[in-house]
Amino acid sequence: MELTAARLPRWIVAIAVLGGLFVVLPLVAMALRVDWPQFIPLVTSESARSALLLSLRTSLTATALCVLFGVPMALVLARTAFRGQRVLRSLVLLPLVLPPVVGGIALLYTFGRRGLLGGTLEALGIEIAFSTTAVVLSQAFVALPFLVLSLEGALRTVGTRYEAVGATLGASRWTVLRRITVPLVLPALISGAVLSFARALGEFGATLTFAGSLQGTTRTLPLEIYLQRETDPDAAVALSLILVVVAIAVVGGAHRVRPIGGSGPPGTVARPVRSTKDAR
Amino acid sequence: MIRESVCPAMWRRPMWRRRAVVLVPFALMGVLTACGSADQTGPASLSAPASSGTDTDGGSITVFAAASLEESFTELADRFEETRPGTVVTLNVAGSSDLATQISEGAPADVFASADEATMERIAATDLLDGEPVTFATNTLQLAVPPDNPADITSLADAARPGIRTVVCAAQVPCGAAAERVAEAAGVELSPVSEESSVTDVLGKISSGEADAGLVYVTDVRAAGDAVEGIAVPEAADVVNTYPIAALTDSEAAETAHAFVDFVTSADGRTVLEAAGFGAP
């Protein structure tokens, strides 16, 4: 930090500090408003616990869905070339840009009772509206681009040379994917999944629009905070702090993954060199 | 996080990265607009500088009004501006509770019109009211169903039938508290599939056809037009929500603020409110 700071113009550092304060100060202001003597009772009330558990459960499921669909999506986007790929990529990343409420409306028009797939789903006996499934769908919809984006970036960074070497040595496509590609981008995959989880945990707009709000079924922590704010601002602030702490833990955890695996150029070069040597 | 994994690729494959960079401002815009609409300012008037000078206090006021009052207050503000040339009324429309929080955190408001007495009392408790609040309208609940009433709902008891998807407001918000009392008065036990945090969300679930029925205000059904059908609930007549209005002490245009309160509670004001479906106080 000191070395780098010495090379930077001072005013850049000053602006960076201002920007940092802009992010950190509101969190401090919120922490200052917490009614500490009442903190434990406020965050352990039945509705709060039920909301936190639901949030964790749905976010984990949504993250699993993101990995399940996001890894193949990132691979297709990074390793193939076809007409309309750029357009497709932009569309896949769209949930990043959309206000979540718009995402919720779009999901409603797709999976809702009168939506595009509503009739089909009803015929199959699947009810999505007002169910926990709707919460998971909302979360997966907004979180998926985070995984695709970070994984595709990593795939492009590591390049295809080692995969090509593996293939010339007779490895099947599946073996190349399993033994070379995935290990190379594993750190990016983990941090992408963690980011998706964090985004799913904070999902509010799409859930509110698409899933509704019922304790234990669809009322996740952000929705509980929004509702508590109406009558019990102290509870809302206390729960907000819980969400912030979870988010910090998650994002901090994602950062720690990087130095160990190292998806940046130095780390990625070091590992495959060894593995290709082994192969030789 | 993302940038770290993206940046090394930037000089290798610049084509789509550039596209991603182009997307970023849009993402920011999305965030900003989402925030902007949260405390939307009503279209009652654009803030042309009030250059009247005839009024003692300049005549520009900001009115914080409950969400259900948006249409009527837009019209009331227009009429008020007509009767007092040079006066500019700016509306800030949101849920009563949000407005109360904004006011107690120091938002510049001259008049506050709440959808329930409890919220007004919260502001009264902080000594921010200039004078006693006046009740200017009442509202009652009604059943709302999608236009073709697919579940054949005719009464509150129908809405409580098993398999019927009924949506209400959560008990924490005024419309939810009222819904509980109506159900109690009718001797009906509702088991809603969702307890929304605002009446707008209840209405949205009904107009989209997701829910079969919901309890919303009479004025909401009227404002929604053809999007929903209203069904009167006899038991709801006794559960009346009252709307108080008051001028605020922080006002820099106290005279105009009081004049606006008087105008809303006048016969002219009542006509506008009744046209929207509000009851007399």
Image (tube, coloured by chain):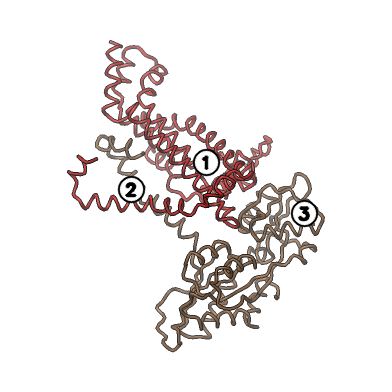
Looking at the rendered structure, the kind of residue marked 1 is Gln
Write down the quadrant of residue A268 in the picture. Answer: top left
Query: Which of the pair A124/B108 is nearer the observer?
Result: B108
Q: Give me the chain letter of mark 3.
A: B
Q: Write down the residue under mark 2.
A: B22
Q: CA distance from mark 3 to mark 1?
A: 33 Å
Q: What is the letter of the red chain?
A: A
> Does residue A228 sit above or below A61 in this rendering?
below
For the residue carrying disc 3, how many other residues have a C-alpha within 10 Å: few (<14), some (14-19), or many (20+)? some
Mark 2 — on which chain does it sit? Answer: B
Q: Residue at x 25, y 34 (%)?
A: B12
- Quadrant hosting residue B171: bottom right
Of the pair A175 and A110, the residue shown nearer to us:
A175
Q: Chain of mark 1?
A: A
Query: Which tag, 2 or 3, sits closer to the chain's start?
Result: 2
Which quarter of the figure is the C terminus of chain B placed in? bottom right
Q: Secondary structure at mark 1?
A: helix
Q: Which residue is mark 1?
A: A139
Residue, disc 3? B153
- Which residue, as the protein is rendered here, is positioned at the far bottom? B54
Residue drawn at (68%, 52%) of the image: B167
A181 to the left or right of B80: left
* Chain letter for the brown colouring in the rendering: B
List x then y, in percent, for residue B200. Answer: 61, 58
Instruction: Tell me, yes or no, whether the two marked residues, 2 and 1, touch with CB atoms within 8 Å.
Output: no
Q: Secondary structure at mark 3?
A: loop
| In this picture, residue A42 sits left or right of residue A30 | right
